[in-house]
């Protein structure tokens, strides 16, 4: 947090001086009065200026960036965290970890486990004391896109197998975020429906073929459990 100490004839003057030095509007700072002004006696002696400490309130982007970089630094990983242009698909912020290729595997972890854990923590930090919840998406090495494409291909193959064999197909156990990708991808198909069975961390997606005798209305209105 960037902080300056400034003086002035009044507290307001001191704050204005600090704002000029910091280059930010008053809404972006916290002010702590260190010393109230005292008017000089007899017009000449005993007076003193106001003294204030003004600190810039970090943005949520800065909070997230500093937190993630700090955690990675303690892991022995030299990396930079960038806030992506725009917002993520669900309206939250999107952060990207830029690091050496050999370190990317450590940041991502097995099936994204480390990346998911870090994303959970940064969401907790970013939303402390906030009235409205903001969701943070964290990525490294373009893992999220590659993982989504891999799951969609797996879902497509499994759906084709279910239709061909006319039997349900169980996928391997996966976290809720991966199951959601499978369910969402197959929503557009009318020849299969999906559900989830089991308890975390062993919960699995089941792809069920829709038999031809099933009324079309029930296919269109099917629901899935994540």
Image (cartoon, rainbow, N blue to C red):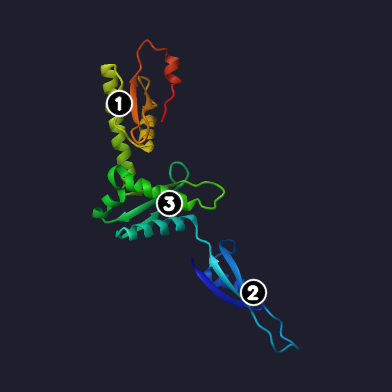
Which residue matches tag 3? 122
Depth order, front residue of 88/200:
200
* Residue 98: image location, x then y, percent: 32, 55
Dot 3, how many residues are within 10 Å of its Cα: few (below 14), some (14-19), or many (20+)?
many
| Residue 5: quadrant of the picture | bottom right
* Residue 142: image location, x then y, percent: 31, 47
Helix, strand or loop at disc 2? helix
Dot 2, how many residues are within 10 Å of its Cα: few (below 14), some (14-19), or many (20+)?
some
Could you tell which of marks 2 and 3 lies nearer the N-terminus?
A: 2
The reply, left or right, for residue 3 in relation to residue 149 is right
Seen at 46% across and 57% down, the residue is 63
Helix, strand or loop at disc 3? helix
The reply, left or right, for residue 15 in relation to residue 167 is right
Could you tell which of marks 1 and 3 lies nearer the N-terminus?
A: 3
Mark 2 vs mark 3: give the one in front: 3
Could you tell which of marks 2 and 1 lies nearer the N-terminus?
A: 2
Helix, strand or loop at disc 1? strand
Seen at 69% across and 87% down, the residue is 46
State the quadrant of the C terminus: top left
The reply, left or right, for residue 189 in relation to residue 40 is left
The reply, left or right, for residue 149 in relation to residue 48 is left
Which residue matches tag 1? 170
Seen at 35% across and 19% down, the residue is 191
Depth order, front residue of 62/188:
62
Which residue matches tag 2? 13
Question: As displayed, is residue 120 above or below residue 9?
Answer: above
Residue at the farthest right position? 42
């Amino acid at each position: 947090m960037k902080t300056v100490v400034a003086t002035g004839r009044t507290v307001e003057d001191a704050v204005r001086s600090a704002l000029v030095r910091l280059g930010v509007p008053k809404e972006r700072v916290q002010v702590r009065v260190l010393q109230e002004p005292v008017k000089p006696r007899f017009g000449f002696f005993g007076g003193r200026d106001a003294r204030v400490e003004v600190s810039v309130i970090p943005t949520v982007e800065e909070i997230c960036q500093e937190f993630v970089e700090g955690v990675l630094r303690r892991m022995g990983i030299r990396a930079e965290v960038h806030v992506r242009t725009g917002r993520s698909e669900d309206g939250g912020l999107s952060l990207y970890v830029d690091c050496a290729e050999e370190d990317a595997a450590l940041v991502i972890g097995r099936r994204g486990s480390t990346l998911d854990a870090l994303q959970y923590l940064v969401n907790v930090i970013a939303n402390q004391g906030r009235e409205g919840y903001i969701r943070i998406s964290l990525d490294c090495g373009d893992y999220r896109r590659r993982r989504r494409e891999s799951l969609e291909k797996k879902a497509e193959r499994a759906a084709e197998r279910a239709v061909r064999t006319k039997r349900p197909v169980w996928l391997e156990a996966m976290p809720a975020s991966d199951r959601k990708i499978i369910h969402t991808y197959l929503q557009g198909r009318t020849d299969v429906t999906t559900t989830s069975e089991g308890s975390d961390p062993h919960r699995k997606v089941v792809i069920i073929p829709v038999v031809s005798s099933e009324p079309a209305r029930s296919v269109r209105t099917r629901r899935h459990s994540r």
